[in-house]
Structure formats: C-alpha cells, structure tokens
Image (spheres, coloured by chain):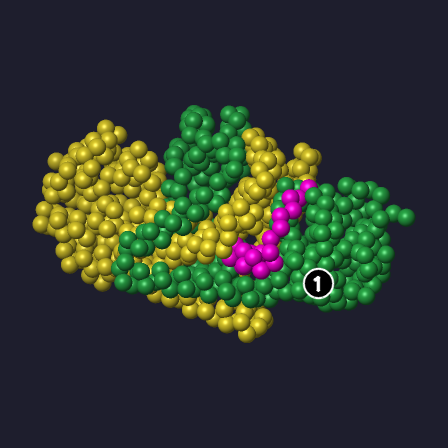
Chain colours: A yellow, B green
Amino acid sequence: MSPKLAVLGTGLIGGSIALGARAARPEVVVAGHDVDAAALSAAVESGAITEGHLSPEHAVSGAEFVVVCVPIDAMPATLRRVAAAVPDDAIVTDVGSAKRSLVEEGERLFGGRFVGGHPMAGSERHGIAAADPRLFEGAWWILTPTEATSEHAYSAVTSFVARLGATPVAVDPSTHDALVARLSHVPQLTASALVEVAIAAGDREALLGLAAGGFRDVTRIASSNPDLWVGILRANRVAVLEALEGLRGRLGEVSSMVAEGRWEQLRVFLERARSARLGLFAKPDFDGAPVTLSLLVPDRPGLLAEVTTAAGRLGANIEDLRIVHSTEGGRGRLELVVTGEERAEILAAALEVLGHHVERMPPGVEDYG
Amino acid sequence: MSPKLAVLGTGLIGGSIALGARAARPEVVVAGHDVDAAALSAAVESGAITEGHLSPEHAVSGAEFVVVCVPIDAMPATLRRVAAAVPDDAIVTDVGSAKRSLVEEGERLFGGRFVGGHPMAGSERHGIAAADPRLFEGAWWILTPTEATSEHAYSAVTSFVARLGATPVAVDPSTHDALVARLSHVPQLTASALVEVAIAAGDREALLGLAAGGFRDVTRIASSNPDLWVGILRANRVAVLEALEGLRGRLGEVSSMVAEGRWEQLRVFLERARSARLGLFAKPDFDGAPVTLSLLVPDRPGLLAEVTTAAGRLGANIEDLRIVHSTEGGRGRLELVVTGEERAEILAAALEVLGHHVERMPPGVEDYG
C-alpha cells in the first residue's frame, strides 16, 4: 500500500505542502481536507491532493503523517476533532504562527507524536490557486520540539520539511512566540497605531504632503488583512501582551529622555538601535559595505528597466530598491542599495552617462527630517 | 547693483537652494556662509555661491533675501547673531524641520519679515557635493506664516520657493510641528524602540530567520543618523512628546483589547488603520487599482533588469517594488506593484513566459504571519 499523507486545510500553505510532497515523492497518496467544498475540488483538480474529504476524520484515516494547515483560530478544534481518527503511530504537525498553547494541546492529544511547526515562507495569500511546490525553498521552517517530543517524530518532521526545500530549525515554543511577537505581531499593531495617530492630526492633503518615504515604509504592513491578524494575535496573546508592554515601557523611557532633555542618552539609544538594525540584515555573504545610490527620476514606464539593466550589465547585484513617488506625481526618487564601494561607483558612473544625476550615500544615511 | 541672496549654511539643502536660485536668475549674487572653511570653498568652487563668508554677518550684509540652512540646533543662535547685520527691509526664511519655537524667535528678531519654511524634499545627506538645483522640483515646501507675517514677505518667499520648482503650502507652525512629529519624528523613535525590543529577545541567528519583510520595512529608518535626529527631536520637543504620548495611549488601548479578549474591537482598529493607510498613498492620478505581483527569484545580477524591462516594454509603470532576500541567500522574493488589473495581468503573463512563477495579490494582501 502507498504511504498516505493527510493535509488538513488546502489553502496556500496546505496546497503548497501537498504539491511539494507529491513532487518529492510521487508515490504518496495525499488526502486533503477543507471545510470549503469548492476549495477542496480545486485542490483535487490542481493535482495537489489525490483525494478530497469534507470530513477531517476521513482525511486522517490510515495516514502516516498529518499536517494541520487550517486557519490558526480553527487549529485547536481541528486537532481535537481528528484525535480519535488519527492512527496510533501517525505523526502530527502544524503550521500555526503561534506555538505554545497549540503545542500543549497537540501533546495532550497526541503525546510525543505531535511536533509544532511554523514555515517562515509564503504568506496567508488566498487559496490553492497561489500554491507553489517551491514556496518553502530556501526558507526556514521553525520546529518546536519539547522534552515530550519523540525522537522518531522529530526526525520524521525534519525530513519532511527538508524534502520541501526548507531548512528545519528547532526553537522552544515559548521562545518562538516571544520572537514572532517582537518581530512580527507587535510591529504590526504598532504600524496600525502610528497610522491612527497620524490621521488624527490633520487632513489627508497635508498628511500626504508631509509623509516621506520613512512613514510609508514604517506603516506599509498596516494595510494587511485585519481578520487574519486578529486570529494570529489571539493565538499569541500572552507573548504579544508581554512584547507590547516591553515596547510601551521603552517608549516611556524615550519620552522621559525627551521631556527631561537627556539628549546624550537619547543619542545612545538611537545609535544602539542603528547598529543593531544595520547588523541584523547584513547578508552573511556580503561582499562589501552597502552603498545607497539615489536618483531623481521621471515616473514613467521603462525607467526602472534602464537603471536595473545598467546594474545587471555591470554585475552589480541590487540588494534593495525603494521608489519614493513625489506627491505631485510625474517624478520620483529611486534609491538603490548595492554592495561594494567600487561596484557602486562604477554603477553610479554608468547611470550618469545615461543622464541621471546620482547621489552616493554611505550606509545609514537615509534621513528625512 | 545686482540683487543679493544670502545662504547661511552651504550643505546639501543650502547648496541646492543656491544652485537652484542661480539657475533661475543668473544675475543674482549669492553670498554663502558656513562655519566649515573647506565646505565654504567647495561651495564657491561648485558655482553654488558667488562669494563665501566665514562670518554670517558679512554674508547677510546688503542682502535682500536671507535663507538660513544651518543645522537645526544652530538656527536660533545664527538668527540672533545676524539680526543686527540683516538690512531692515530684507526678508528672512529658514528650512528647519521644526517650526513653532523657531518662528517665535524669528518674529521676535525680524517681525513680519520672517517666514518659516520646511522643504519636504531631499534629506540631510552630506554637503555641497550632493547639492542639486532640481532637488526641490515637484516637492512640497511648507511655509508657516502667522498673523504677524507681512504680506510682502510671504509673497516674496512663495515666489522664491516656486522658482526652485517646489509647491509652497501654508501650514500653521504648531500644526506643522504636530504633523511632522506624527509622520516622521515619532515613527523614527518607534522604529528604534522596535529594534531594541526585538534584539532583547534572542540571538542574531534566530532573529534573522524569523524577521520577515514586514520587520525590515518597519525598522528601516532605525538606521538613520543619530546626531541628526537628536537635533530634530530636540527642536520639536513639545510636539514629539505629545505625539509619543498619543502613541503610547493608543498602544495601551490595544494592549487592553488583547488582554481582555475584545477581538472585534481590535479588528475594527486594524481595519480603520488599513483603510487609512491604503487611502493615504493612493496617487491622485491612479489609473486602476494597485495589484501586487510576487515572484520567487534567484538573487543574481541582471534579474531585476529582466523583470523591469518586461514591465517597461508592456507600458506597465512599476509603482512600488520590494526585494525580500531569503535568509539563506541565493534566492529572494520580488514584489512589484502595478496599477490596473488588466496591465498587471499582461505583465504577469509576460513574466510567466520568461519562466517566472508569479502570484497575483489584490491590494492589502501582504500578510506575513
């Protein structure tokens, strides 16, 4: 008999896992479950799953490996519902973005055969149509084994994840939750709060004129899907509260520095954050210091191609790129980050030959007052 | 006799103003002042100023129009120092990024002949070498006239700014300060605080693996120049404190919603911020809804050129572009925002012909759990 994998929830993540698993091991039967019949049919038609079940119990029946990919709010109930139907020797894992309480529930139901997981790739984009067997290639896949986890189960989940092209990394469930609270969940809430504070201050026209690229960057994630985020924040409530209080405390200290005119202390605070930020995203294979080139450009089709073609011809890999539209339209500023001062200089010279006026900025000089 | 313009502070902003003013009216004498003799010589050599003075009093002597572009901390002292030397009928303006207390000082010294200003272009990048006569083209230039401002002075400053290619916009000094506190100064402090809260939580490797594009965006400005920012925050102390308290209060309310499980209220908060953020940066000349195309791409020179050339050929103007490097290096995700669903579809099809796997996302679907 063919080995059987059960994928509960056939959206983007579940669908991508199913496609990747079938690509790696074509002999595997993939039983999919979704509460949405149309989504389930689409998953069958796309070839991601070999059989579709509206009942999760039927999907897990006889499976050796179960991956739970339903929305995070639905995970505990789904785990409880399939508990009796999952074979006694099957391994169960999930992809939820908060881990501690879910791992507790999983271990209560499945003992050492449950291993929590969280792939750091993809997104909560919609449905099977966006599924991609290569979604996890090169990405980290956090696993959260505990003392209760069986060695066999951990090793099976590790191999499964590696076959999808991801790099499995073990992190304690509480540490995972604290990290994502600080790196994702609280920044999300903060971006939304910054937008609210800004719009409370004036009319749209004035805001638009005064909001520079910095505000645009800081608040970009505020346009994310609220329903999705309520589910995530709810699932990671404890860690989110702790990180939020940490941020509020830090902002309180900053507020005191400003109120009491402790400017040197404020400078040290900004300097420490600056070093940390610059260090955090330095790629391990950096081949030179990052240099930002800034160009005032017409806002027209083809312009980006002209600039990036020049970079490609010169072998300069563009590490980051930012387009700052002028508020009037028609013009904008293009900022390119390339590594290596020599390469940056050659690219700048080439762009000047093309008629652009290019400013060179060393790292960290990106300051709009 | 030729008309005389005095520019105090010949860095990027002062130098760009001087170059722009000379380009618009070549007959004008531009007297420059800087405390840095080398910077002053460079400004003369670049042709930005026609005469250089280490003494600000000499620079303003006989001038009809004085623009103060020294660092914001040095502005009040510079205004006081030149007060007696500025001719009685000369008009004085400045470019400081905080206005209320500076305008008070300017009016105390020069009465209705002082008009506060703040160009919303450029940056505090280094020196005359980066100066550009077109720096202000298409940008807003906030002016902060008060009841005390003479009509003649306001009209002269408005014309001066318009000749540089900027659009003058009048805002009350306190409103200006409140707006920049909320749109720039507090986001700056918040980005730094978010970095500090994040690095307190774990080792660099775990942080790097878990930090997605959202964190990168939110904290980008944390790598700005601390010395510059201390000057700005100090100058806008009152408004910054008020905006900081506003943010802390809002985060406190959010914290209560999470603590007390008021999820529907949290959803409404996120939804309101989402609508506001999406509305804020919608360009007035939008010719269709923004669609994001997302590609998994190799991290190599030439790739961006391939993608943007395809866009240019098809007449699709790339409104925004984001590069999300994978933590492992070698691969990344490229997100392009184009307007108009039809154009987005044509571009996506062309990129698929080139062998890319393209995901289409409607606006606001940009959610990393």
Report the magenta residues as a range: B165-184
Task: Label 1: state its secondary structure.
Answer: helix
Residue beneath the point at 28% across and 35% down: A128
Residue B325 appears in the picture as rendered: no
Q: Which residue is mark 1?
A: B107
Residue A253 lies left or right of residue A164; in this view the side is right
Among the 4 quarters of the image, the one containing residue B98: bottom right
Count of marks overlaid on the render: 1
Chain letter of the residue carrying label 1: B
Which amino acid is tagged 1? Glu
Q: Nearer the viewer, residue A32 or B138?
A: B138
Among the 4 quarters of the image, the one containing residue B334: top left
Q: Is residue B111 above or below residue B270?
A: below
Residue that lies at the very extreme toward the left in this rendered image: A84
In the rendered image, residue A44, in percent from the top left (x then y), is placed at 21, 31
Residue beneath the point at 52% across and 34% down: B285
Q: Is residue B7 magenta?
A: no
In the rendered image, residue A135, in percent from the top left (x then y), is placed at 35, 40
> Which image quadrant: the N terminus of chain A?
top left
Q: Is residue B180 magenta?
A: yes
Residue A17 lies left or right of residue B230; in this view the side is left
